[in-house]
Each structure stands twice: as structure tokens, then as C-alpha cells.
Amino acid sequence: MTASTSRSWIKPAAIGAVVLALAGIGYASFSSSTPAPNVTFISITGEKISTASLRGKVVMVNFWATSCTTCVKEMPAMVETYNKFKGQGLEFVAVAMDYDPPNYVLNFTETRKLPFKVAIDSSGDIARQFGDVKLTPTTFVIDKDGKIIKRYVGEPDFPALHLLLQKELAG
């Protein structure tokens, strides 16, 4: 059997399934009743925001990086989502990954005038506690009881996200 024929059994669909399975590592433990981890975000302004202090509010936690093209592409829609729902009580924390240079994060935040809290996960601990987030963007929606109700890997379907936020904020 030659090298080229020995791999002929690998189908593109199988590769896609493996990629999806690997992307889901760390996710299997999350269900609609999984409590959000008890973490404290340190914003770029030095503010400490704990998940415990956000109980009673609907929260979006978005893991992102300035080097992530999808993150940069989705950020205007994230800003629009926040602006649409902040008056109804939505809280939003954008968490820059540990490999993102802090000066890049600060520059991005200032030049794009991001209206929500931006934190840097300098040690990677927060990403680990949220199921070992490795892929960006990854966004979590947390309900008023502090439970993770949705996890998006990649850019969310924003109309569906908006419907979910409407429902949770009204409840």
C-alpha cells in the first residue's frame, strides 16, 4: 500500500467530526444548569468584577484576542448587542486571552471605543475555569441565577443570540 492509498479511507466529513470533537473538549461538562465558575476579572482600568457580584444579571463573557480575525470581525456586532440590551440589564465582559499583549488590548479597546468591561486573562486561569477555552472567539451567556445557558464557539448567530437575551432579560 502506498502512502497516498493508505490515507484514502480518511473522508473530509470524518476530519470535520474530529475537529468538532476536539473543539468541544472541555465543553461536555457544561449544560444549561452548570454554574458559571466563581472567578474575578480584572478590567484594564483595574476594576475587579466577580461572577458572584454579577448574580441577578444576565451576563455575556466573550473570550477574544486582537490577533483573532473572527474576534475583530464580530466585535462591532458585540458592541451593537451590548448597546441594544444594556438598558435592560445586560452585563458584558470581554476577556482578552493570556497570549494577547496588554498594549494591543488597550489600543484596540480605546480605538474601537468598546463600551463594555474589558479584562485581560494574564495567567490563563479564567479561560481554564470556563472549560479550558482555547478557541477564540468563545462567548458564554450566563443567566440571572449564575448558570451558563449558552456557549458559542466562533461568531454567534446574532439574531438567535438577541432572542435568547430578550427572553432571559425579561424573565
Image (cartoon, rainbow, N blue to C red):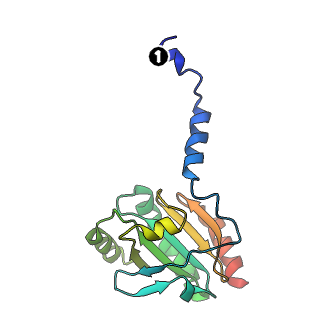
Q: Can residue 77 be seen?
A: no
Q: Position of residue 54 (x, y in %)?
A: 56, 86
Q: Position of residue 125 (x, y in %)?
A: 44, 69
In front: 16, or 52? 52
In front: 133, or 86? 133
Q: Position of residue 7 (x, y in %)?
A: 53, 22
Compared with 120, 4 (above or below) is above
Outermost residue, right direction?
Answer: 171
Compared with 127, 115 (above or below) is below
Q: Left of 62 or right of it: where is 111?
A: left
Residue at image position (60%, 64%) is 151
Q: Which residue is mark 1?
A: 3
User: Would you call the spot at circle 1 few (<14 residues within 10 Å), some (14-19), or many (20 or more)?
Assistant: few
Q: Secondary structure at mark 1?
A: helix
Compared with 152, 118 (above or below) is below
Q: Position of residue 99 (x, y in %)?
A: 34, 62
Residue at image position (61%, 34%) is 14
Kind of residue indicated by mark 1: Ala
Residue at image position (54%, 79%) is 38
Residue at image position (59%, 87%) is 89
Quarter of the rendering containing residue 12: top right
Quarter of the rendering containing residue 70: bottom left
Q: How many marks?
A: 1
Outermost residue, left direction?
Answer: 103
Q: Can residue 111 be seen?
A: yes
Quarter of the rendering containing residue 67: bottom left
Q: Split into 4 quadrants, where in the image is the C terminus?
A: bottom right
